[in-house]
Image: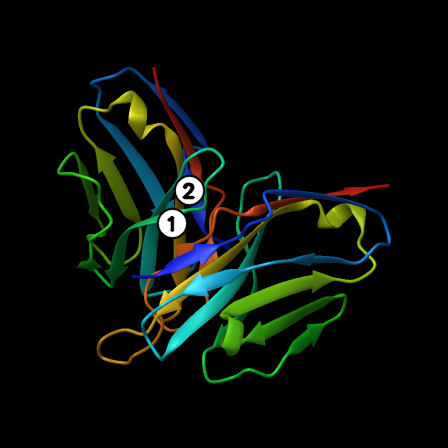
């Protein structure tokens, strides 16, 4: 596609449930990032992939959060045992290389009730 | 540690006025990158500019201009002759150089400035 695509655009889940958020990067982009944006805040870095491997996962808040990118393209962010504090917009970005500009998707708004 | 401060939470201007959005940063690195992104109501972050720490030359792109001053650790953004379509949240971000010097690391964002342009 022309841009970074994220699905679903909105997700409402109950506390304690498991959720998966999907990101389709721009074709040919090897670098992929996940960010989390809480209301009224700037995005916060979660994890960075170079190809299939997670090169930097220092932003993941705890072990309930996990992300994969098995074929070096689509990535899935997985959250186990969701908590109300996980409610936020989850943004995905991709770039051609790590040192080039990152292009963001429109995000997935996650609401945990 | 890195930090980005956007002291202006919200700004309102009347259409055609000029407006400057402030950004002050902190970093211990000598090599770093500064960015501005626009986030319209649709939610998608739109890249506006990237500037590396060795290039202090100001830049102009149409109605947009950026003033980078290392002496004051500031990277301010000015919109000339503002338009209603400029209404959005604007984020300043910092990226420190990677250990292997291959390029920009992950972005650290400020809290954003919400700009409203009144027709």
Which residue shows up at 34% across the image and 15% down it? Answer: A113
Residue at (51%, 77%) from the top-left corner? B71
Which is nearer the eye, B89 or A82? B89
Q: Is residue A64 visible in the rendered structure shown here?
A: yes
In the displayed structure, would residue B80 be above or below residue A4?
below
Residue A65, position in %: x, y?
Answer: 20, 38
Residue toward you, A2 or B18: B18
The numbered mark at residue A24 is 1
Residue farthest to the front?
A: B72
Is A85 located above or below residue B63 in the figure? above
- Residue B66: give x, y in percent of width and height: 64, 70
Give the left or right position of residue A51, taking residue A112 as reference: left
Give left or right: position of B110 versus A54. Answer: right
Q: Which image quarter is the C terminus of chain B in?
A: top right
Subunit ID for the residue under disc 2: A
Residue located beneath label 2 in the image: A6
Label 2 SS: strand
Q: Residue at x 13, y 38 (%)?
A: A63
The quarter of the picture where the N terminus of chain B appears is bottom left
């Amino acid at each position: 596609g022309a841009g970074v695509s994220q699905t679903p655009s909105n997700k409402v889940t109950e506390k304690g449930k498991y959720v998966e958020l999907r990101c389709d990067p721009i074709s040919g982009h090897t670098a992929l990032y996940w960010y989390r944006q809480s209301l009224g805040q700037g995005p916060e870095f979660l994890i960075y992939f170079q190809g299939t491997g997670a090169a930097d996962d220092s932003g993941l808040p705890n072990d309930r959060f996990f992300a994969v990118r098995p074929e070096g393209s689509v990535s899935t962010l997985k959250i186990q045992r969701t908590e109300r504090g996980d409610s936020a917009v989850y943004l995905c970005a991709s770039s051609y290389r790590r040192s080039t500009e990152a292009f963001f998707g429109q995000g997935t708004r996650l609401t945990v009730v | 540690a890195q930090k980005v401060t956007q002291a202006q939470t919200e700004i309102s201007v009347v259409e055609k006025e000029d407006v400057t959005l402030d950004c002050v940063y902190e970093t211990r690195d000598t090599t770093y990158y500064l960015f501005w992104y626009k986030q319209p109501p649709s939610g998608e972050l739109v890249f506006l500019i990237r500037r590396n720490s060795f290039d202090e030359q100001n830049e102009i792109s149409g109605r947009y201009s950026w003033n980078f001053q290392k002496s004051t650790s500031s990277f301010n953004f000015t919109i000339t002759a503002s338009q209603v379509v400029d209404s959005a949240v604007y984020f300043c971000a910092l990226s420190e150089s990677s250990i292997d010097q291959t390029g920009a690391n992950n972005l650290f964002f400020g809290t954003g400035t919400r700009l409203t342009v009144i027709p």
